Amino acid sequence: MKTISLAETPVRELNRQLQEQAAHFREPDWRITDPGGRHALAVGLDAPLNVTIDGHVGYYCAGMNQQAHVTINGMAGVGVAENMMSGSVRVRGNASQSAGATAHGGLLVVEGDASARCGIAMKGVDIVVGGSVGHLSAFMGQAGRLVVCGDAGEALGDSLYEVDIYVRGSVRSLGADCEEKSMGPEHRAALAELLEAAGMDHDPAGFRRYGSARALYNFRVDNAFAGYGEEEIES
């Protein structure tokens, strides 16, 4: 295992060494110490690395990840695992806003709570949160699954496309075009698989499922002139 202390090594040099593994894969296991809340750690990785960060991280840790498995033994700032394509990211503590934003694939696990807009514009990633999520989580989510083992804040799933949302606790309110869905055996099986992958020991029967009512993104002639005045429509 290769160990790098950020008290001695600049972030740019750390990322250069990690990204270099994509072209010359030689060292699979990395330990990063003394992160001190620095931003953009372990970003743009594209190799099957195991990266452990001991401490708190700042903005956009593990962004644009492909293949690598990143574990953060601490808290994570804004945008952890944003735009992840594959691999996994695990936060042992809490995550700030926009965790997993726009991510296309892979698995993001937050063992604590995640703040507002968790999974905003998610495009295929699976996100499992051990605690609660803040307002507007899964906002404009297009694909993937969001599992919340605690409670969900206001406007859950606002303007949702095709994301499956599972919540074990209470939901403060649903966003526009988000509704509660039936929970069939296939959904419980998929949820059980996700929980096991995340290392969460919960009964899938205790969750409720939410998804899109599909009223916003389908064309309706009544909405064709939305935003126009009567004179403009008549002309």
Image: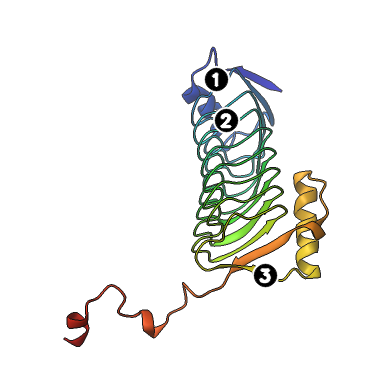
* Residue located beneath label 1 in the image: 36
Q: In this view, which residue lies farthest toward the bottom? A: 234
Density class for disc 3 (Cα within 10 Å; few <14, some 14-19, many ≥20) is: some
The Cα atoms of the two marked residues, 1 and 3, are separated by: 43 Å
Check contact, mark 1 vs mark 3: CB within 8 A.
no
The Cα atoms of the two marked residues, 1 and 2, are separated by: 19 Å
* Residue located beneath label 3 in the image: 181
Residue kind at label 3, given as amino acid type: Lys
Q: Secondary structure at mark 3?
A: strand
Q: Is residue 112 left or right of residue 35?
A: right
Q: Secondary structure at mark 1?
A: loop
Q: Earlier in the sequence, mark 2 or mark 3?
A: 2
Image coordinates of residue 73 in percent, x first then y, are 67, 28
Density class for disc 2 (Cα within 10 Å; few <14, some 14-19, many ≥20) is: many
Numbered disc in front, either 2 or 3: 3
Q: What number is the disc on residue 18? A: 2
Check contact, mark 2 vs mark 3: CB within 8 A.
no
Q: Earlier in the sequence, mark 1 or mark 2?
A: 2
Q: Residue at x 49, y 33 (%)?
A: 59
